Amino acid sequence: MYAAYHLKADELNADLIQNLKEVYRQRKIVILPKDTYEEWEKERHNAAFTEKLQNSIREIEEGKVMVKTMAELRAMENG
């Protein structure tokens, strides 16, 4: 399960902590400052983009692409 709670440090209190303990029981919880979280998200999305790009390059190298000229595409479009 993934959940993100957005609150200010002074909003942390015993009730919130108790609620987290009840919801997540014996599971591990990570609490990050927002700037750290945003950096982590940026890196995660960059990694996903890089993987997609590498897969596309691999497909090109393996010849798993279709090449069409603009004229062929126009002809396909016009039916």
Image (spheres, rainbow, N blue to C red):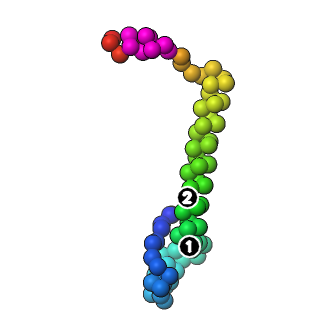
Q: Residue beneath label 1, please?
A: 33
Vertical side of 39 occupied by 51: above or below:
above
The percent coordinates of residue 24 (x first, y second) are 52, 74
Q: Amino acid at mark 2?
A: Glu
Residue extent of the magenta highlight: 68-75
Identify the image quadrant of residue 54: top right
Q: Which mark is residue 21?
A: none
Q: Is residue 26 magenta?
A: no
From this viewpoint, is residue 27 visible?
A: no
Q: Residue beneath label 2, please?
A: 41
Residue at the bottom extreme of this rendering? 14
Residue at image coords 55%, 68%: 35
Vertical side of 33 occupied by 57: above or below:
above
Relative placement, left or right, of 61 versus 23 is right
Q: Amino acid at mark 1?
A: Pro
Residue at image coords 48%, 66%: 3
The percent coordinates of residue 53 (x first, y second) are 60, 37
The percent coordinates of residue 12 (x first, y second) are 48, 84
Please, what secondary structure does the residue beneath circle 1 have? loop
User: Which of 30/33 is in front?
Assistant: 33
From this viewpoint, is residue 38 visible?
A: yes
Residue at image coords 50%, 82%: 9
User: Which of 29/73 is in front?
Assistant: 73
User: Which of 61/28 is in front?
Assistant: 61
Residue at image coords 45%, 14%: 70
Q: How far apart are the alpha carbons under marks 2 and 1? A: 12 Å
Q: Is residue 69 magenta?
A: yes
